Image: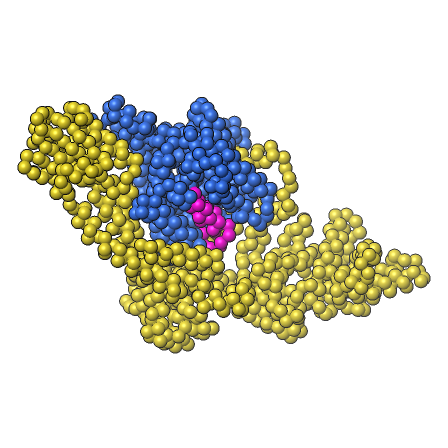
Amino acid sequence: MRFAISLLVFICVASLIGTVLPQNQASNTYIDQFGPFWFAVFDQFSIWHIYNSPWFLLIMAFLVVSTTLCVMRNTPKMLRDMRTFREYVRGSSLKAFHHKVDVDSALSPDQAVEQVGALLRRQGFRYRVRADGDSRMVAAKKGAANRLGYIFAHVAIVVICLGGLLDSELPVRLQVWLFDKQPVVGNMLISDVPESGRLSARNPSFRANMLIPDGKQSSMGIVSSGQGVLLQPLPFAIRLKKFYVEYYDTGMPSDFRSDVTVTDLATGKSFDQTIKVNEPLRYKGVTVYQSSFDDGGSTLQLKAWPLSGTESQPLDLSGAVGGNARLPAALGAQTVDYTGLRVINVENMGGNGDPQPVDLIRDVAAVTGSAVRPRSDDLRNVGPSVQYRLVGADGQAHEFTQYMLPVRIDDFPMFLLGTRNTAAEPYRYLRIPADDQGTMREFMQLRAALADPELRDQAARRFAERNAPAGEQRDLMFQAAQGALRTFSQRGFNGIIDSAPQDQREKILNFAVPMIQLSLQELRLLMRERQHLPALPDSGPQAEHEAQWLRLSVLALASLPDYPAPAALQLSSFHQIQASVFQVARSPGKNTVYLGCLLLVLGVFSMFYIRERRVWVWIRPSDAGSSWLAAMTTQRRNLDFNHEFERLRDALRRLGGSHDN
Amino acid sequence: MTTDILTPDAAALWARDMNTSGDRRGRRGRPDWTDFAFFLLLAVGAGHVLTSYGQFMDYYEKLILICAVGLFSWLGWLWRPMRVLMITAGASALLAIWLYSPTGALLQGDLSRAESNFLLKYLLSSQSAILWMCALFVLATVCYWIGFASKTAAWLGTVLTWGAVYAGLTGLLVRWREGHLMGPDIGHIPVSNLYEVFVLMSLITALFYLYYERRYATRALGGFVLLVISSLVVFLLWYSFARDAYQIQPLVPALKSWWMKLHVPANFIGYGTFSLAAMVGFAYLVKSHGETRTWKPLIPVFLLGAVLCAEPLVFGSRELSATWMLYFGIGALIVGTILAFRAPIAQRLPSLELLDDIMYRAIAVGFAFFTVATILGALWAADAWGTYWQWDPKETWALIVWLNYAAWLHMRLMKGLRGSMAAYWALSGLLVTSFAFLGVNMFLSGLHSYGAL
């Protein structure tokens, strides 16, 4: 048993490691975390797949063998012990028992046997009487099933491990080894996969994934194996009629279900069924579970707004999620990977500041009452968003997210253009104010105008004219504005203060910011004249709105140089196609494991709650009638046993009608 | 002629006032007319529910309701005070439901009544009731400790603990209702996230403690067991105030299953009794060191106690919040004070044999239910995620906890391990249990991340 215990400790530690280190991730994640040297060391021990590693399985195997041996060794003994009444115990040896009692009684031995027998029966004992000359030995026992509990519980462990083995990765690995299968790495059409990449349709144990877009059909599961995947043909084909996801107000999914049609490949018959998260489909020994969902290749129409150069007209782009497209040559001809489309984005538009300290009373009052407290949250669905990936001018890949519709922030509708370098970071947003028509057009035109040196100069001139008296001051102001606008257009505000010494920066900004703002105002007016747009009002709420627009545009323009893409892609329309992700499994060991579980529960409860007791009463004739010596024993001594013995002792004494010698 | 009832002189042979049933009967015996009346009451109630609201329930829910009638009747026979508890908490919850429906039609309800109606606002609405539970538990802790010097205080401790259990149970039942009032698909049994299970665990631990208190006729352990319940309460309050965690959240699709009603409570019977056993182990160590004059043998106990108090610090180590520093400080102080006063405390604690017996009993029942809960979890996982065992961190840690206590039981049953070693082991088992309960949710990601902090 000590061996088993050390094995168990080993398993505990190994399992622990497996919980702390995320398992089954891509190798680069681990290399990033541990560095190449330690990665190589840990890899030797298969720490990334610890639960399926050979040494872990070996330990489990040892455990199973050790438990089996233990059970095999003890069971015959226990079964024998369970059945025997041990009536051949000698009367005198009862004196050696710790829990014993002597009773004198007026009853004759045979009467005593009857009465004692009746008492024992009432207490739940079964007994056997052995006659030994004039004496009688009543040997009783109860709760023998306690031993059965031990046997059940330990057999259960073996059964569960064996069943689990059948359902583990082992059968697939065995097939890969026996039949020389080669896992497929990289993308390939299903029809191109060779025989070595497919498992047999009669594979008795597997766990596979299936991604089926709306309206499509598949009869092939994907089993992951080693570094690649293997194909698993199923005995039926599943066609996803429609995938539904329902949401709560908070934007969290409340339910997903797939309406599928299942067609038996052998007979051609088909039937419909709905698969939900806790309601899998079971057919022909294969179970299909609703695992998650994904995009099934939604088609996208986008507009690409150039972010450099003097052109402000957007170019049209189209593609599908999961696919890619090339930006037009005018924008750099890079490849855009469309990674996602989210049709519903529920965001919390409420106050996001740090919680302010409140007095305790208010806090207590705040948490009393019903558990439904209207929060300061303002949850709103802000509309669809698209995610894509682009390689920037710096050669690094960036991820982008774009909301299709303007979002009202601080009471002004703005387009949010998010970017991040890796999935681990949060998105940083560029906020572009929406113009009167609710588009980015005016902003983009402003940007294009800023990039045009001729227009910049003109705007600077107008600024100088408006704000400085004629003469040298005006010239100086013009030059300052011209330079500032040029620097600003290339590198934003940072460009202006970068070259200045630290202590001067604030002063320079105090001067430069209004100058740029006013110059850009001129630029905007200039641009609007060129486009034959109506004049902006001078006063009133509309004027205030326009002034706000300009302020936000300045901020956006200042951040634009940090946006790592040559164009801003805006979603103009889409057609969503969802895909349902199923997990498909054949688990031959499942019923074995369930049987083991039942045995385990029965065993554990029997071991604790069925109390095994043995009682012997040696009745021998005496002058007064008979004299009894009773003893009680149990495998497990605890407080209860003492009290049970005391009750038995008192009952026997009452029966005997006399007191202790 | 034998009798099934204890005769007076036989009773005197037992420890004073101790009984196997934990209530006035002394021994359980056969069910009597009160048990049948209780069963009838439950059956009538269930029947009413099935006829009036049966169309809203699916097959499994009806089955669970019917089985619940049997289970609760049996529970009432097992321990009489449960009947009183169930009736009072049930009646209070029904009152709250009625108060929530201004028109009297119970299917409709108005949550804003929690603001206007006095009873709801201060007593019966779920959060108010749960806060009362927290306050009563803390008061009970104090009373039990004073109870080492005063019998009345100890009695008060028992009363307050019962009050807390009643309040907590009412709170959970009303919370169940409030969830349904929030929206058609939002209501669910309140065992679905970390907040709710904290309340459940406090209740279960307290109930088991109260049972053992009656059964072994000693109030001396109240202070110890209520220490762990108080730390649960502190965590609950922190979680409510700092993270707004008390709000009822709708269920994610994976949790929308009748399995939750079985798996989660069974699990917390396990966790609750393991915590209780750990505290009894602590009491054992205090008693066994009651006569020691030097500090050195006490160091392991103090360290263990301090580490347990430090656990939340470690968990919340992202920000060393003031609450947890304070908690650790006060916790260490409490452990130190208990050890300093070990002599008088040890005198009032029951015998070592009795403490050992309670530890064994608690761990045995906890282990049995934990086994059941893990198996139910596996069955549920098979239905929901496609496989019954995935070495998910929570599942793996459940296995580690199971193995830990299986080892403890093995050592005791096969090798006869008793005494201080068993007590130390039970106490350190709390570390493993609390990591499996909390640490996994907070640190390790996986399929079980329903209660992230």
Residue in the image at 28% along x and 52% along y: A154
Whether residue A83 sits left or right of residue A42 in the image: it is left
The residue closer to the viewer here, A1 or A416, is A1
Quarter of the image where one finds residue A94? top left
Residue in the image at 66% along x and 68% along y: A566
Residue B240 shows in this picture: no
What range of the chain is rendered magenta?
B426-450
The residue closer to the viewer here, B201 or A68, is A68
Chain B visual colour:
blue
Q: Is residue A190 above or below residue A62?
A: below
Residue in the image at 49% along x and 32% along y: B341
Tell whether position A34 is magenta.
no
Q: How many marks?
A: 0
Rendered-image quadrant of the N terminus of chain B: top left
Give the dominant element type of the magenta stretch: helix, strand or loop. helix
Chain A visual colour:
yellow
Residue in the image at 41% along x and 37% along y: B288
Whether residue A101 sits left or right of residue A594 in the image: it is left
Q: Residue furthest left?
A: A133
Q: Residue A610: where, in percent of width, then height? A: 25, 41
Q: Residue furthest right?
A: A471
The residue closer to the viewer here, B132 or B234, is B234
Q: Is residue A649 above or below residue A88?
A: above
Q: Residue B13: where, in percent of width, then height? A: 28, 27
Q: Residue A516: where, in percent of width, then height? A: 80, 59
Q: Residue A29: where, in percent of width, then height? A: 52, 64
Q: Is residue A493 above or below residue B182?
A: below
Colour scheme employed for the rendering of this structure = by chain
The residue closer to the viewer here, A282 or B294, is B294
Residue A10 shows in this picture: yes
Quarter of the image where one finds residue A364? top right
